[in-house]
Amino acid sequence: MAETRLRFAPSPTGFLHVGGLRTALFNYLYARHVGGRFILRIEDTDQSRKVDGAAENLMESLRWAGLDFDEGPGVEGDCGPYIQSQRLDHYQKYAQQLLEQENAYPCFCTEADLQQMREEQQAKNEDTRYDGRCRHLAPEEAKEKLASGTPHVIRMKIDPTRPAYVVKDLIRGEVRFTPDQIDDQVLVKSDGFPTYHLANVVDDHLMSISHVIRGEEWLPSTPKHIQLYEYFGWDIPEFAHLPLLLNTDRSKLSKRQGDVATEDYRNKGFLADCLINFVALLGWNTQDDQEIYSMRELIENFSLERVGKSGAVFDTNKLRWMNQQYIKQKSPEELSVLLQPYLPDFAKQSDPEQLQKIIQIVRDSLITLPDIASRLDLFYNDNPELQDDALLAQVKSDPFQQVYKGFVAQLEQADELTSENFGQIMKKVQKETGIKGKNLYVPMRIALTLVEQGPDLSAVVNVFGKEKCLQMVKNVIE
Ligand code: GLU
């Protein structure tokens, strides 16, 4: 049986869009699930849209996300090079073949001709498309123009007599297009570079791609691709078009409503395994609605049968929730490594053991990695003070004041303050004041952590020690 081969084929026009990350991931998961190969191909034939450094940036985002490819730039296999601008002779050869077979024709229309054509069609309320005028040029006239060096493109012929072009899609079933919906697509531009359509089909064939998984926006291109496969007499790969990504208001996911670059999420302190988990659920799920998946589980469970057709909502609140779950699952050692770029210098230069303890204490409150900075002040400032007005009002109340005074009295008699004797001290305060449970601990929590709900108090006092705790409680005594 032929090998299962999938590819991710981004154009290096900027950053890796989260939609692109989802496409790459689904190709990767499918390949890994069936034991096939995952290939990266850089589609850079559109010179006008090419951005310097974008290919390297895409690869860095894929590497960060853990999507390693088996063949691609820098990981050479049998089908390289994997950068289209290094494969131009292939496209020229196959464009020539189509011309010879009369499946394609030179088109000499200028930009002005095309503009006029569009305007006339719009005036008649018709769909705007190429009207095929150069397709019907007398062969001698075309030859003459070519001989005299008239600028031209090469267009493919769409068969107007065909009842329909049928795309068999693994997610959508059969999708039919009538020939009048499809333009005689440009295959080679006047600068001699192939368009996406020609280069994509030629490379999918030469790279023996068995499955093409890509975004829904490419579905209207697929009938053109099918026609090219037929002209060349090549096997047609399986197609699967993934549902659109939507904002929470169900409009198409756009920069205007939030971040769309994988690197934005990376820079904002989302974890790679979380983003992968989150993106995997954009259009795919398992029957049991499980939410947290490791990469191994994703690979094990992935199937195209469970990819939906309708748009998938990119809900950043869900992503934030998920990131918090991932941070909670990390060991303090793993988390310390991840937090390094976000640590202020004073923390980096502090006692590593102490820092590790602090990280463990605040871990569960972190939603994204940069949150660490605001959590450290409590521990590194010798005398952090309560700022919140509502809490300041609360600490003035009588029962709170009783707790504070009782605590100071007990603590002053103790040699030190650790997690162990904190419980005993609190018991004594309870005995002296008659205040217990929540009424005893909430005041202490506010005085020592400056928030109502926070990390485990006995762990906090252990890091603070006696003097700092005394000072902080004294700060709130009237
Ligand atoms: N180069 C296209 C892109 O940028 C690839 C589409 C496809 O996968 O066929 O998305």
Image (cartoon, rainbow, N blue to C red):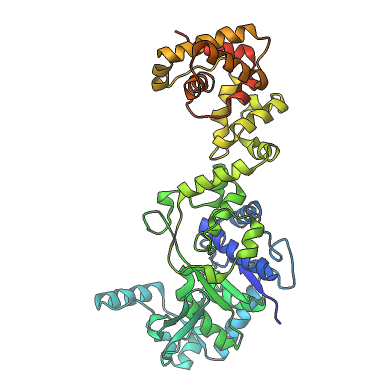
Residue at image point 48% right, 23% down:
442
Q: Nearer the viewer, residue 468 or 276?
A: 468
**Location of residue 362 in the rendering, given as x and y in whole percent from the top left corner:** 59, 32
**Location of residue 422 in the rendering, given as x and y in whole percent from the top left corner:** 62, 18
Q: Is residue 151 left or right of residue 469?
A: left
Quadrant for the C terminus in the image: top left
Q: Is residue 350 left or right of residue 15?
A: right
Q: Is residue 308 above or below residue 274?
A: below
Q: Is residue 357 above or below residue 294?
A: above
**Location of residue 225 in the rendering, given as x and y in whole percent from the top left corner:** 52, 80
Residue at image point 43% right, 66% down:
310
**Residue 14 showing in the rendered view:** no
Q: Nearer the viewer, residue 350 or 201?
A: 350
**Residue 172 showing in the rendered view:** yes
Quadrant for the N terminus in the image: bottom right
Residue at image point 55% right, 52% down:
262
Q: Is residue 71 above or below residue 435?
A: below
Q: Nearer the viewer, residue 177 or 248?
A: 248
